Amino acid sequence: MNFCKRAWLNVWAKKGRSILLILVSAAILMFVLAGLLIRSAAIKATDQAKADVGATVTLSANRQAAFKKMQSSSSSSSSKSSRPKMTLTPVKLSDATKIAALSNVGSYNVTSSTSVNAKSYDTVSTSTGMGSGNSGGPGGMKSTTSSGDTAITGVSATSLTSDFSDKQSKIVKGRGITTADKNTNHVVIEKDLASQNDLSVGDTIKVKETSGSKSTVSLKVVGIYKASSTSASSAGPMSTDPANTMYTSYTLANTFKGSKYQGTADSVVFNVTTPSKVSSVKTAGKKLINTSKYALSTDDSSYQTVKSSMASVESFANKIVWLVAIAGTIILALIVILMIRERRFEIGVLLSLGEARWKIVAQFFTEMVMVLVVALAIAGAGGKFVGNQLGSQLVSQTATTTQTTSSSSNQPGGGGQNGGQPSGQMGHGGPGSTSSSSTQQAKTKLAITVSAVDLAELGGFGLAITFLSIMIASGGILRLEPKKVLIS
Amino acid sequence: MLKTQDLGYWYQTANEPLFQNVNLTFDVGKSYAILGHSGTGKTTFLSLIAGLDKPKTGEILLEDRSLKQIGLTNYRRHDVAIVFQAYNLFTYMSPLDNLLTAMAITNAKHAGDKAYARQILKDLGIADDQLTRNVQHLSGGQQQRVAIARTMACDAQLVVADEPTGNLDEDNTRAVIAQFQKIAHEQHKCVIIVTHEPDVAAQCDHQFRLENKRFKQLA
Ligand SMILES: Nc1ncnc2c1ncn2[C@@H]1O[C@H](COP(=O)(O)OP(=O)(O)OP(=O)(O)O)[C@@H](O)[C@H]1O
Ligand SMILES: [Mg+2]
């Protein structure tokens, strides 16, 4: 191909012009690459968040319906001096097993919370001077069961709770509660409580029920966990110390609550194996339950937050890519048009020799491709730098958005809990507590790396830009009359 | 070999034709000179012969085939080689690459043959060290010789030149004309030279003068 040789001779002979073209192309490509890198990093971050957060569906009492009922009863019985009470129907485990059988539902965790009073040990008192527990239920929501100084969180398995899976609470000795602990009196206690009372794995402690027969029950310590400091702060001043929370099997918690709580739970959290299937699981699950009493809610808020913020990063990156590509095409086209004007004479000689016009266009294109290859290498090195700068700028903005969104999503914290509980429990039940959003932020850092795929995509963009600009400029070649150029 | 048949041409801006009813015949192995005053239309006539423009009336026939039939691009590539006053070389190439490029484009018999191209340039007095240096480092006379060498390296039977000696001194002029004579007589091509120098014209085998819109053959 003679036009390739001509292209090379021209690029080589006119080094100054070639270097200028390389620099212009490299600058254009660098911004395209930065956009591409941010976009792929945003996609990666979203995928990562998807994998990290997973997605859950929570079965709990329908608080909204219960609240409406309470309001209507309060208006009808306004003469009564006592405040109206909100009755929440405990979730039936038979419903839970039906939902668990749906496709895309993986493991599920049953939570049943209550409280007992310490018998053979002393509870840990908070530094806020709230005394040893007995702070009573949340204002205005007195329930039939009175509160004890020790919070009992009955679960299917501690590893399935968000506190443990988010690594906010950790087993430090022994083991956690597992499904094998069903119908046993095994308990996992907090480290501070254990050290204060000199308790270790294998010891037995005694507690006194707060309802029913108020009998004394012996519990066997199978593990010791360490609660994170954040849960203490998020619990608020109204609470007892988080060290006074014990984990048991939900069956034991139900026993403490009384015989009518057999086969029930405060809430059941289902893990959905495919995050995108959350809403379909929710729809299918709602058909299986009495929605006037129970609610099925999704808790992929943190994933949604990451997804939406990354989606905005991605769309911004897309805009960069396209804007730069279009601007680059226009700039290159103008340069090529000028270049062709300057080379009218050469084109005339080629035409007088009988060269085909498309081969002249091909020569210009080949010259630009040669320039592009060098520019690509420069942009590959520089694009990572530009991408990192832009990316960190974008993420720091995004992180602020994430923070605001997740802290506002905390407001309904403590949902799905039964009435008469120590308010210390409030910090645990709430989905997406402040501390978990901070871990989320760490994960949404954009990892900017230049892969071969990125460079290939960039090369594609570069080729397209070059091709388009040559096409725009080639009108001049196609219309050029050799006689006008050569004879004047 | 080449015939013009009732050839006529005029520019859109002019209200009368430059020439009309031109019937001339050019043969291989001969050299022709076209003389005439400035602005009579010599270059215009040559551009028609070179296939750079289309006649307004009449036809140009190459071996009884009209240029229309052959196609102008095809004709320029295979049948005609052009030498201009302004040399018309590729300024970003060496003399050698100029020849090789033209040979490749015109698909010449010796295309790609570097030794052949070198020999032609040497025969025209281009020094060894100048062969591969940029063509712009050469003098006007040398550049014109490179342009002539280009027509020799290609296979086209028809060589047209527009005032090829216009920018040259006497010595260079003599050398260039001698080359054209060689092309006509040794390479057996048809050479048509436009010139306003009577000395140059006198060395050609036949002379025409463009006057009053007609070509007159001189004795
Ligand atoms: N592109 C053009 N458009 C309009 N008129 C033109 C054009 N080119 C040339 N002419 C006119 O046509 C006439 C013939 O021009 P041409 O260049 O053929 O003359 P010439 O015989 O070669 O003259 P010279 O000896 O000065 O080179 C001139 O009067 C010129 O002004
Ligand atoms: Mg002229």
Image (cartoon, rainbow, N blue to C red):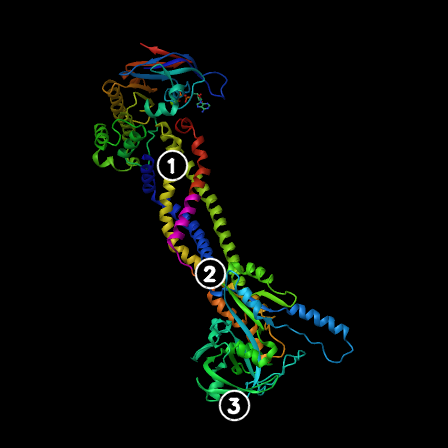
The residue lying toward the viewer, choosing from B69 and A435, is A435
Asked whether mark 3 and ligand 1 are closer than 8 Å, the reply comes as: no
* Quarter residue A483 falls in: top left
Q: Which mark is in front, 3 or 1? A: 3
- Give the residues drawn in magenta, as a range: A448-464
Residue A362 tag number: 1
- Compute the Cα span from label 2 to label 1: 42 Å
Q: Residues within 10 Å of mark 3 (few under 14, many from 20)?
A: some
Residue A269 tag number: none
Majority secondary structure in the magenta region: helix
Q: Is residue B105 above or below residue A211?
A: above
Ranked by sequence position, the earlier of labels 3 and 2 is 2
Ranked by sequence position, the earlier of labels 3 and 1 is 3
SS class of the residue under badge 3?
loop
Residue A82 colored magenta?
A: no
Q: Is residue A427 above or below residue A107?
A: below
The residue lying toward the viewer, choosing from B216 and A384, is A384
**Residue designated by label 3:** A120
Q: In the rendered structure, which amino acid carries the disc numbered 2?
A: Ala
Residue A287 in view here: yes
